[in-house]
Image (tube, rainbow, N blue to C red):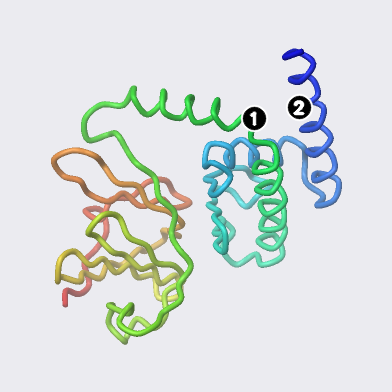
């Protein structure tokens, strides 16, 4: 009975991948990579890296960032695929536990300050006193928080604002297009941002202002 159920689940998944692939004009491999990422994220978020999907990217409900930052057509396509796959994962949760166990196993093998916990940026809806960055920066493309540290990314001006306690520090992100953030677990407990060039620590960025 269990084998029959697994075969049935595999057949359903294969059919879904083929249909989504054909509908959006991308390979089944690209769709499968997104599906695996969504399962790791419990169907609520995904961190992926595939050339057909704009390179490195990150998705959560209401938010999407891809490496090809200005390609709005591709961004809409990836958003649609993520939305469909998220529904599929939530409607077919039989593989979620396995994905979570594998993710936990991989994380347990890291050592000291190299162990990272990943978190997505959140879509910005500024109201009232939620705005804590200088007016000169305008509206960020994305914001988020890790424990007591808050951050906001301004892609147009290539600026990253970080607030820790009452101190706000503004960094020049240069050629980095930031789409996510991790946090090192250890004595430093510092932030590590994800960009199309890989991981970048704030120590590697130039400080342009402190407020």
Instruction: Give the Cα distance between marks 2 and 1.
Output: 8 Å
Task: Look at the numbered disc 2 and give the secondary structure of its residue.
Answer: helix
Task: Look at the numbered disc 1 and give the secondary structure of its residue.
Answer: helix
Query: Residue 168, percent across and down?
Result: 20, 71
Q: Nearer the viewer, residue 162 or 123?
A: 123
Q: Quadrant of the C terminus?
A: bottom left
> In this rendering, would 12 be left or right of 97?
right
Residue shown at the point (41%, 61%) measured from the top left: 175
> In this rendering, would 194 be left or right of 34?
left
Disc 2 to disc 1: CB gap under 8 Å = yes
Residue shown at the point (69%, 63%) measured from the top left: 76
Q: What label sits on residue 9 in the rendered view?
A: 2
Q: Earlier in the sequence, mark 2 or mark 1?
A: 2
How busy is the neighbourhood of tag 1: few (under 14 within 10 Å), some, or many (20 plus)?
few
Query: Residue 90, percent across and down?
Result: 65, 43
> In this rendering, would 210 be left or right of 63?
left
**Outermost residue to the front:** 1
Q: Nearer the viewer, residue 21 or 178?
A: 21
> In this rendering, would 118 be left or right of 89?
left
Q: Nearer the viewer, residue 113 or 130?
A: 130
Q: Quadrant of the N terminus?
A: top right
Residue shown at the point (35%, 63%) measured from the top left: 173
**Whether residue 93 is situated above or below residue 211 in the rendered picture:** above
How busy is the neighbourhood of tag 2: few (under 14 within 10 Å), some, or many (20 plus)?
some
Q: Which residue is mark 1?
A: 94
Image mark count: 2
Query: Residue 5, percent across and down?
Result: 76, 20
**Whether residue 127 is situated above or below residue 79 in the rendered picture:** below
Query: Residue 161, percent across and down?
Result: 29, 69
Quadrant of residue 122 within the rendered picture: bottom left
């Amino acid at each position: 009975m269990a084998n029959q159920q697994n075969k049935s689940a595999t057949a359903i998944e294969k059919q879904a991948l083929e249909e989504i692939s054909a509908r959006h004009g991308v390979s089944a491999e690209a769709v499968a990579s997104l599906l695996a990422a969504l399962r790791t994220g419990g169907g609520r978020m995904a961190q992926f890296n595939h050339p057909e999907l704009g390179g490195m990217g990150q998705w959560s409900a209401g938010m999407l960032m891809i490496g090809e930052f200005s390609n709005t057509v591709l961004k809409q396509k990836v958003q649609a695929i993520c939305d469909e796959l998220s529904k599929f994962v939530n409607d077919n949760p039989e593989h979620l536990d396995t994905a979570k166990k594998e993710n936990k196993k991989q994380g347990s093998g890291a050592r000291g300050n190299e162990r990272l916990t990943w978190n997505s940026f959140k879509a910005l809806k500024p109201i009232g006193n939620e705005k804590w960055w200088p007016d000169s920066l305008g509206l960020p493309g994305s914001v988020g928080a890790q424990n007591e540290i808050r951050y906001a990314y301004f892609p147009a001006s290539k600026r990253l604002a970080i607030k820790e306690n009452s101190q706000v520090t503004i960094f020049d992100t240069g050629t980095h297009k930031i789409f996510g953030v991790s946090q090192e677990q250890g004595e430093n407990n510092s932030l590590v941002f994800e960009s199309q060039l890989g991981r970048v620590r704030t120590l590697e960025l130039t400080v342009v202002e402190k407020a």
